[in-house]
Image (tube, helix red, strand yellow):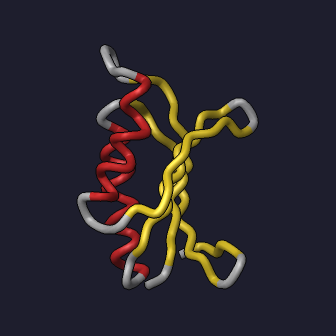
Amino acid sequence: MPSYRVTLAVGLLRPGADPEAVLPAAAAAARALTTVEAYDVGVVRGEARVTVRFLADTDADAHRVADAVEAGVREHAATSGGRLTRRWGARWHPA
């Protein structure tokens, strides 16, 4: 089964949102649909980014998971720059 990852920039938190809840919400949204391999939050060029790596049978399934992850994060914060990639060998390519 192919490995995919979705990366989202995380912006302003919603009023009353707990910043510690953003990453678990992203992982839980993916976990509700598929197996989650890893998840992480990092800062790239001063911007917080959430990454969730997961398994999916097809690109269409992966897009559904990526949409769910984005919806899960948007419950807590604004998002932008969503990107879905698929692993081919040692590299990640747009899905």
Q: Nearer the viewer, residue 66 or 33?
A: 33
- Give the number of marks: 0
In this view, 57 is above or below 40:
below
What residue is rendered at 38% in x and 46% in y? 26
On the rendered structure, is 61 left or right of 23? Answer: left
Residue that extends furthest to the right in the rendered view of this protein: 45
Residue that extends furthest to the left in the rendered view of this protein: 32
In this view, 14 is above or below 63:
above
| Quarter in which the N terminus is drawn | bottom left
What residue is rendered at 36% in x and 21% in y? 18
On the rendered structure, is 11 left or right of 36? Answer: right
What residue is rendered at 51% in x and 43% in y? 80
Measured from the top left, where is residue 28 in percent x and y?
30, 49
The quarter of the displayed image where residue 47 is located: top right
Measured from the top left, where is residue 44 in percent x and y?
71, 39
Measured from the top left, where is residue 63 in percent x and y?
39, 69
On the rendered structure, is 66 left or right of 34? Answer: right
What residue is rendered at 30% in x and 52% in y? 29
